[in-house]
Amino acid sequence: MDTQNDTSILGGELGSAGENDSDTNPYFLLFVNGEYYGYYRWAARSLTGKNNTWKSVQLHNGDDVQLVRVSVPVWVSEESSGYDSTRWNYIFSDYSVLYRDSIARITMQTPSQTVHIGDKANFSAAVTGAGTTNRGQTKSSENITLFISNPSKTETLSQPTHKTTATTDASGNLKYIFREHGYYTVAMFNVTTDEVGTKDVTNIETPGEYYSLYVGDYAMVYVEDVSDTAALLTQYRAENLAKAKAYFEQFHDYDFTSENYQALTDAYNALKSGQTSATSFKALMDAFDTDYAALQAAGANALDHAAIIAALRKDLSYLPDDLATLTTSDKDLVLEIQTAYAALNYYQKSLLTAKEKATLEQLAKINAAELKEPVTVTVTITQPALPYKTDSGSPNYGWPDHNKILRIKADGTTTVVSKASGKDLAGVLEWSKENVAVGDTLEIRRYLETTEDQYWLVWSTDNGTTWNRTTAQTLTSQHGISYPGYYLVQLEIPKTLQTGDTFAVQLKMVSKAKYQQMFETLDEAEITKLKNAAIAVVEAAFNACKQSEYDADGIASLTAAKKTGKDNIQAAGTETAIKTARDNAVAAIKAVPKAKSSIVSTDKTQYNSGKTVGSVTVKVENTTWKEKDGAPITGTLVSGEYALGENDSMMTMILQALELGGYTWNGIETVNSDSYKTTYIASIDQGEKSLEEKGGAAGAGWMGTLFNQRWKWCDTAGTT
């Protein structure tokens, strides 16, 4: 067994501490009679007791045992790196919840006909879940690579060590051209880089897709010789050159930097030279595989003109209308735009408007090093003694109390210019910060234990003439613990201030009664308007309930909930109280149970409809093509009222009704979640019977009706 130290695997270069040791301490998936038995480490064989997991496997005479060597499924964990920071670390340990749905088998279909040198041999692959949680589920069969051995003169299994450039398309199909005759051992593996699973600092787990856990398949293929290899050389030389020419000529010089366009040209010329000089069919095709891959690699460096111009336009949108108002705060933006504009080639500049070019030319003349300093002022915060909480709040959001000066750029990114928090604010009733640039943002956050008397934190910037509410926040820790009691305000330092001015903020607590008086006081006309609107909402909720769906007790409960709600609304004296009474009444009405329901649940279908939001009547029938005329299925196929989910469309409701009725569609043998991706019904099937388009008549097809309005003919279009 190969146990060499392979530093190319993820984590293999880290050494003994925390190393991915899948190379020197092999890992295996174990299958017995096609059934997954678990994940085993080679080194565990020498352990004692329950640590020797190999001894827990019981095998019987005649069992089909398959050991598949794999690399340990690496995952990534977000961990705390400070009071308010985290970092991501690779973890090389067994964490099955993140990889178990990736365990699968590749089933390969080899060419059904005799293969000769030069044939475009057809291979296909299917991928099926093989783990305990995904057994039998269909997975994507795209991007699976064909491997082949050297040809053998005898029908003997060999090592398929040659990775070809042939990979499967979205349907799981590929073609490969064999270059020599003989017996080949062929295999299929998915060598796509694993999309590793993650667990963030709040313990939210996101499973990955581990293509390395797709168990490959192998077979033997015999390739017969051909008599006229010269004809093959001529044919494929022409095909290869035509394919390369088409790829090369789709580009222009302005699609690359000058260096990269030269690299593309060199790769193309090298390919042509290799095709011209090849004297054997194998040499011709091997050279093309290598050289065409190099050509594509060079082509991958093509410039994305649309993305480049879009990024430049986005930066331009952040500039002030008057470039003369730019300050040193804008230096990074100015330099970024100047650099981007200077890098544009003639074609990219032709994509700009005249106004954009004029702005960019004007900006190009500005010396970013000579931008003027912004106007700066002094910021002060005064407050009485506040009812601070004594704990440290949510550990994921830093010190609970802080004064921050933030620079929020036009693109939304935020830089902390200065910060005072924790001990810096302990017992401080007056705080000040000098040289704060106008346009920056002052963020104040306090973590408070509120009462009826000290109910809400308010702020003022006009010496107490006007008081405003702070925003209440509840912050959650990585362990899901909620921390209410945060109060936040963000204020932009007015750009109208001049150097030497002071931006003064006052904080204070107000009682609940004062809070309602300050922020919920309404005149009688407004109170009456709010009450009438709230009562209308309650009436609408009551009227939306079909009385026929409730028994006598239910109707009495509905009526009582409506009356109580209306009485509470009339008794309310503030906007908040009115809204609370309204919401409570609507909730009470909705909570009254119905007597019975004839609605068919769709929970057992293969489609995830999400939260139920209503119901819809679905009926599928064949009343036009008669049994006497050869119709395989006639009359009503399905009919009923079905639960409607938030993820449903007209098409998914039809398909779910069919599935529940024992039907499939479009030739599908077994319905799964992918079956619901169809947008077109070509046939409805029941066992060997099929009602399909053009059955019974040349223009026949399925017709849909939505609310008694004919919507489309299914022989020409689908539905969503």
Image: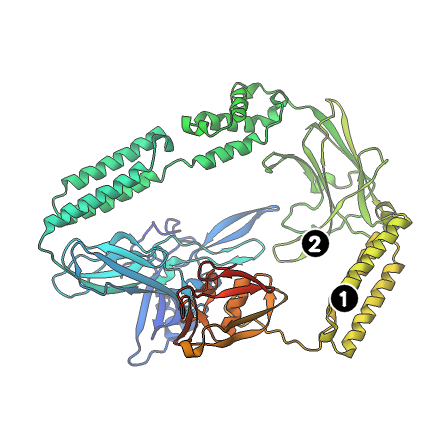
Q: Position of residue 360 (x, y in %)?
A: 52, 24
- Side of 224 where 635 appears, left or right: right
**Helix, strand, or loop for circle 1?**
helix
**Helix, strand, or loop for circle 2?**
strand
Depth check: 119 or 162 in front?
119
Return the residue at label 2.
483
Q: Quadrant of residue 42?
A: bottom left
For the N terminus, the image quarter is: bottom left
Return the residue at label 1.
543
Instruction: Give the answer, above or below, for where 481 lies relative to 621.
Output: above
In the image, what residue type sits under mark 1? Asn
User: Which residue of the protein is positioned furthest toward the right in this rendering?
Assistant: 524
Q: Residue 489's mark?
A: none
How many neighbours does mark 2 have within 10 angstroms: few (below 14), some (14-19), or many (20 or more)? some
How many neighbours does mark 1 have within 10 angstroms: few (below 14), some (14-19), or many (20 or more)? few
- Tally of numbered tags: 2
- Side of 470 where 327 appears, left or right: left
Instruction: Give the answer, above or below, for where 409 lies relative to 16.
Output: above
